[in-house]
Structures are given as structure tokens and as C-alpha cells.
Image (cartoon, helix red, strand yellow):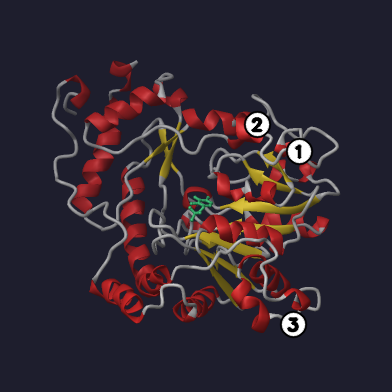
């Protein structure tokens, strides 16, 4: 194998990327749909959104879908839907985007972080049960970097304790867990559809559920215009007309319109991504130091659209080579490789020191008797992940020669690891 590019050799990746990484795929159909909303002057309406919701619910085989202006908003109303309130607790992974957990603070609840599994990068079911207290209302299962959580184990624990499960599907639209679409397994699914995600519609979020009460509570919280006609809930009906949360979470109809078109083509485009990404990892099978982040074929689980595709790093197989040096060498080859993933939330000052609402104590502990904060060293697996994961190229098309060049960049660096140490 030739000399490493970082040492002056030829790059492994030679073919220009073209549109290999461009996302979302926008055609005239998306443009037409957006123009129609603009020209009809119905950007703030709900008719297109309701159509999108109907199609979204159908895709999931669920009764209800509720459009939101962000995924954060959908998670906020999902938590309210699950009756997360003052003094309550949710259990969430710390290795995730902040919106998986932080809306709980705005409800007067707090967050107890659990460990992730080092192979799936999802919440570790073995680290959940001992964290459940009488105040625990919900577990947030984030299908992290497209990998489905171990939902059977999570649901078993949750159901035994009468705790709700919120699936954060923001990374995993269309992923299967043992043949079932993620978002349909917990009590409610909430997800971002902002334009970086694999189902990309602009800014937007979606809540899906079969639970009428969760749906109606979510509607009542942030969708005042829906409250009147949608509610037969005796607790909510008299309150119709004003949003319980004092927030307005309506989806922008250009997003809904683009979303309808994107949804129509999503499964087809996702299948191409899956073929390309699996090809990349198949080409790297057995290479020391690196390991695919994906479920086994036999599991019946899939990675959906492979949003935020990452790989697992095993420095011990490369004589302890640091992930920074490894990644730098892959990038020099023309490849994609950035060490780490989302920073660990439990170490951030907003979750430790900040008194956001003026309670005279950290917001994290605003309504708790005990100190629930988790300092450095409290979640060692989560804290070690920055050294053990890296981003990989997220291919949107299947072009085997380009994919193999990118795989060759990784293979070459692994083979020359001793020159980098
Ligand atoms: C993107 C994201 C969100 C929030 O979605 P927005 O649409 O950006 O508000 C929530 N959870 C996870 C895991 C995300 O990656």
C-alpha cells in the first residue's frame, strides 16, 4: 500500500465528490410545493400541515401525528403529553443533542442521565432501572446516530414501573427495530425534521403516537388553534383557545409542503443510502481499530437514513494511536473523519450551575430534594466516547468506486498506524 498522504503519498480519495454528500435532494416538485404555499398566502395556515400529518401518521401506522416548528418543540410537547411536570424526573442519555432532555427543565422537571452502550451509542437499558424513582415520569430513548435503541428491554422496564417512553427519532427516521419502525414502539415518538436530518423539510418537528391523551395534551400545550375541535378530553376541553404552555409550535407550511414531497421519496432515497453505507462498512470488515456502528443483519434492525453516521474506534487494536491522529490522517487521504460526537450534557454548566429561572438554586435542582447533578466521572462510558467515535462519510448515492476510495482511506491509515504513533 502506498505512502500515507499525511506523509506526502498519494491520496486514497481521488474522485471528486460531486453530489455524493448533498442533502436533501430537492427537485422541481419540492420547489412547486413551496411556491404554491407562497403564492396562496398560506404560510401560517394548517391545511397543508394537516395533510402532511395524515401521511406521516399513515407511514408510521399510527393514529396521530402533530406537526411542530422544531423537533425541540415536539420533544417539549411529548414530555408534557407524558405528564412530566414540576418536581418530576426524566431519564435520558447524556450523549445526545440537548433537546432530547432539556425541555424537561422548562416544565419544572429535572433530568437524570443514564449511560450509553459503547457499541450502539444508545441509552444502556442496564443503567436505567436503578435510576428510576417515584418521581420518574419518562425515559427518553434516543436512536443515536441512526442506531435503534434496545426497545424491548427499555419497554419492559418502563412498563413494569409505569413510566412512559418517549422515542427521540431525530437521528433515525425510517429505522427499524426488529422489523418495527422506530417511533412506534414507545408511548410517543418525537423528532426533528430540520434540514440537516435524514428526513429534511426545512425547520420542523413531528410528534407521533397512538395515545389520544398524549396527542391531545401535546396539542393543548403548544397548538392553541387546534384545541377547540380536537378535544374530547374533559380535563382539556374547558381550557380550549389558549395554549397551556404559553408557546406556539405551529409548523411553517412551506416546511409541511416540502415535507410532503420529501416523505413521498424518503423510503426510496433511504434504501440507496442504506446500500451505500453498508457497502462502506462491508469493505472495512475486519480492519483493525475500526468497527461499524450498525445493527447486525440478522437482528431485523436497520439504520434508517444513517443520519450523523459514525464509526467506533478501538485504539487498543492500533497500539493506542490517538483518535485525533487517526482522523487527521484519514482527512489527509481526502476522507471524512472527525473525532467525537455530541458532548456529554451532564458536564455542561447549564446542567450544573445555571439558575435559569431565578429559583436561587441551580435549575437542575430547582424542585428536587436531592442533588441530581452528575459530575465528571459519573458516566464513564459516555465520557469516554469522544475518544472512541468519529464521523464517517454520509453517502447519499450508491457509487461503488467512490465509496471504495473512502473505505480505502480508512484501511490505509489503519495499515500504517505504527507510522503515526
Ligand atoms: C436535531 C435534534 C433535536 C432537535 O431538533 P430541532 O428540529 O433542531 O429542534 C432533538 N433531538 C436530537 C437527537 C436531535 O439531533
Which quadrant would the C terminus be assigned to in this image?
Answer: top left
Q: Nearer the viewer, mark 1 or mark 2?
A: 1
* Residue 267 place in picture, x, y as percent: 39, 69
> Helix, strand or loop at disc 1?
loop
Q: Residue at x 81, y 57 (%)?
A: 160
Horizontal arrangement in the rendering, residue 383 relative to residue 43 (left or right): right
In percent of width and height, residue 57 lies at 54, 76
Tag 2 residue? 379
Cβ–Cβ under 8 Å for marks 3 and 1: no
Q: Nearer the viewer, residue 268 or 257?
A: 257
Foreground of the two, 24 or 15: 24
Which residue is denoted by mark 1 in the rendering?
359
Query: How many numbered marks, from 0 up?
Result: 3
Decide if residue 104 is on the left or right side of residue 307: right
Label 1 CB, ligand 1: below 8 Å?
A: no
Residue at the image point whose x is 35% and y is 42% from the top: 392
Vertical arrangement, residue 304 with respect to residue 323, above or below: below
Helix, strand or loop under label 3: loop
CB under 8 Å between callouts 1 and 2? no
Which quadrant of the view contains residue 137? bottom right
Q: Quadrant of the N terminus?
A: top left
**Position of residue 366 measured from the top left corner of the image (x, y, whole percent):** 77, 39
Q: Is residue 156 above or below residue 213?
A: above
Q: Which residue is mark 3?
A: 232
Amino acid at each position: 500500500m502506498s505512502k500515507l498522504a499525511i506523509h506526502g503519498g498519494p491520496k486514497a480519495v481521488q474522485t471528486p465528490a460531486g453530489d455524493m454528500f448533498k442533502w436533501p435532494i430537492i427537485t422541481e416538485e419540492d420547489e412547486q410545493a413551496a411556491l404554491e404555499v407562497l403564492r396562496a398566502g398560506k404560510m401560517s395556515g394548517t391545511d397543508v400541515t394537516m395533510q402532511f400529518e395524515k401521511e406521516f401518521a399513515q407511514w408510521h401506522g399510527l393514529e396521530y401525528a402533530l406537526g411542530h416548528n422544531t423537533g425541540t418543540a415536539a420533544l417539549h410537547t411529548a414530555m408534557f403529553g407524558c405528564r412530566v411536570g414540576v418536581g418530576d424526573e426524566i431519564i435520558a442519555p447524556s450523549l445526545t443533542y440537548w433537546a432530547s432532555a432539556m425541555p424537561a427543565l422548562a416544565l419544572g422537571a429535572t433530568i437524570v442521565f443514564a449511560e450509553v452502550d459503547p457499541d450502539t451509542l444508545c441509552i444502556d437499558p442496564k443503567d436505567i432501572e436503578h435510576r428510576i424513582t417515584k418521581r420518574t415520569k419518562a425515559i427518553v430513548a434516543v436512536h443515536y446516530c441512526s442506531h435503534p435503541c434496545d426497545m424491548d428491554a427499555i419497554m419492559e422496564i418502563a412498563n413494569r414501573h409505569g413510566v412512559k417512553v418517549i422515542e427521540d427519532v431525530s437521528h433515525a427516521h425510517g429505522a427499524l427495530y426488529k422489523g418495527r419502525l422506530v417511533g412506534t414502539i414507545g408511548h410517543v415518538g418525537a423528532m426533528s425534521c430540520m434540514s440537516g436530518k435524514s428526513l429534511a423539510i426545512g425547520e420542523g418537528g413531528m410528534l407521533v403516537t397512538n395515545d389520544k391523551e398524549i396527542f391531545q395534551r401535546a396539542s393543548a400545550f403548544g397548538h392553541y388553534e387546534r384545541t377547540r375541535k380536537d378535544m374530547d378530553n374533559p380535563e382539556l376541553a374547558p381550557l380550549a383557545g389558549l395554549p397551556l404552555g404559553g408557546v406556539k409550535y405551529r409548523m411553517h407550511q412551506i416546511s409541511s409542503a416540502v415535507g410532503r414531497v420529501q416523505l413521498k421519496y424518503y423510503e426510496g432515497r433511504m434504501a440507496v443510502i442504506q446500500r451505500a453505507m453498508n457497502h462502506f462498512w462491508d469493505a472495512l470488515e475486519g480492519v483493525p481499530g475500526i468497527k461499524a456502528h450498525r445493527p447486525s443483519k440478522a437482528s431485523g434492525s436497520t439504520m434508517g437514513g444513517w443520519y450523523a453516521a459514525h464509526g467506533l474506534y478501538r485504539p487498543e487494536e492500533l497500539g493506542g494511536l490517538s483518535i485525533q491522529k487517526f482522523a487527521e490522517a484519514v482527512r489527509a487521504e481526502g476522507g471524512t473523519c472527525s473525532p467525537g460526537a455530541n458532548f456529554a450534557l451532564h458536564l455542561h454548566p447549564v446542567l450544573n450551575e445555571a439558575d435559569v429561572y431565578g429559583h436561587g438554586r441551580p435549575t437542575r435542582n430547582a424542585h428536587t430534594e436531592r442533588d441530581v447533578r452528575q459530575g465528571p466521572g459519573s458516566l464513564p462510558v459516555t465520557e469516554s466516547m469522544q475518544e472512541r467515535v468519529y464521523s464517517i462519510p454520509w453517502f447519499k448515492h450508491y457509487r461503488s468506486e467512490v465509496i471504495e476510495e473512502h473505505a480505502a482511506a480508512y484501511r490505509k491509515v489503519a495499515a500504517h498506524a505504527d507510522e503515526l504513533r
